[in-house]
Image (tube, grey):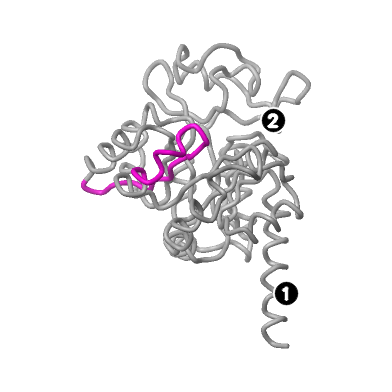
């Protein structure tokens, strides 16, 4: 299937969730665990592609994490790396190529690399992905804090401010200045690592993020103590990045890891296995219902 056909085809999956329901859950810190697909459904389609986002919509996933970079002539495209080399049959830095030049390249399948086959799909533009997401799914905007004003303009243009979730580990004063400069501020999540953990109280009071991403290499991390974790519980969405064990205390991106994350209190999980995580969470929910009826 070509990239354009993904844009034109409406989702026929009866499992797909309504955006209003997803957004309501996102705004409820005590709501169900939200599933975030890392770079979209890259196991079936090229990462960061229109097709990878569309597949997540059809699966009924809550949010897709994408990577946004700016071209030489100021356009915003989806690409994780600074260069297009891994994911396309072209070469060069995104920042040194025009949109027209980038769109002559074809995307490689999956996670790319020289051994991955070429597809008929082109590098996606942020604007077309936000149009696709409208009414269907939330989008986590990564790699683009340095071009946040341009990204914000795209969200306004496409009427998708509520759909996009900015993220950064920038100083809380910088974050607060950006958010407070907007009559209609975007959604925001702050990334907290052990290096900036001491800033968390000021982040919560000044930037007032709706979500916090905790990055912890080991279970002995100070951010996992009751004193640190409890002030966020029930007040912010708490995100765990399960795609690498070094980001979530050594836990795997599979059922045993997800069980620990949900049990500890994380209620947003970024994964490379969105369909499998969805099945796991649905089973968890069913088991809770059974226990309540016994």
Say which of marks 1 and 2 sits in front. Answer: 1
Asked if residue 268 is among those painted magenta in the image, a careful observer would answer: no
**Quick check: can you spot residue 71?**
yes
- Mark 1 and mark 2: span between their CA atoms? 35 Å
Using residue 9 as the reference point, say whether residue 251 is left or right of it: right
**Quick check: can you spot residue 160?**
no
Using residue 291 as the reference point, say whether residue 239 is left or right of it: left
The label shown at residue 226 is none
Considering depth in this image, is 235 or 279 the residue closer to the camera?
235
Name the residue that disc number 2 marks: 111
| Residue at x-position 76% and y-position 54% | 256
Q: Magenta span covers which residues?
A: 183-203
Q: Position of residue 151 (x, y in %)?
A: 37, 34
> Is label 1 in a helix, a strand or a loop?
helix
- The quadrant in which the N terminus is found is top right
Considering depth in this image, is 155 or 233 the residue closer to the camera?
233
Quarter of the rendering containing residue 282: bottom right
Query: Crowdedness of circle 1 by 10 Å Cα count: few (<14), some, many (20+)?
Result: few
Q: Position of residue 286 (x, y in %)?
A: 70, 74
The label shown at residue 287 is 1
């Amino acid at each position: 299937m070509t990239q354009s056909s993904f844009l034109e085809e409406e989702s026929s999956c009866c499992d797909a969730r309504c955006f209003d329901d997803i957004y309501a859950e996102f705004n409820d810190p005590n709501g169900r665990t939200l599933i975030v697909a890392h770079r979209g459904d890259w196991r079936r389609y090229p990462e960061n592609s229109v097709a990878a986002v569309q597949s997540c919509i059809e699966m009924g996933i809550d949010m897709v994490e994408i990577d946004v970079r700016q071209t030489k002539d100021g356009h915003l495209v989806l690409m994780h790396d600074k260069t297009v080399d891994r994911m396309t049959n072209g070469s060069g830095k995104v920042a040194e190529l025009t949109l027209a030049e980038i769109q002559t390249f074809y995307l490689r399948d999956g996670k790319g690399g020289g051994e991955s086959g070429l597809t008929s799909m082109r590098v996606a533009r942020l604007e077309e992905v936000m149009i696709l997401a409208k009414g269907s799914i939330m989008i986590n905007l990564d790699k683009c804090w340095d071009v946040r004003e341009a990204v914000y303009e795209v969200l306004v243009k496409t009427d998708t401010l509520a759909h996009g979730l900015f993220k950064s580990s920038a100083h809380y004063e910088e974050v607060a200045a950006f958010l407070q400069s907007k009559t209609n501020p975007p959604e925001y999540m702050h990334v907290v690592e052990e290096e900036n953990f001491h800033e968390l109280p000021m982040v919560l009071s000044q930037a007032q993020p709706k979500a916090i991403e905790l990055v912890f290499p080991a279970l002995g991390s100070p951010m996992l103590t009751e004193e640190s974790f409890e002030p966020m519980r029930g007040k912010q969405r708490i995100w765990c990045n399960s795609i690498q064990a070094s980001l979530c205390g050594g836990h795997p991106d599979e059922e045993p890891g997800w069980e620990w994350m949900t049990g500890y209190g994380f209620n947003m999980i970024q994964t490379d296995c969105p369909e499998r995580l969805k099945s796991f969470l649905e089973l968890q929910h069913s088991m809770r219902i059974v226990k309540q009826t016994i």
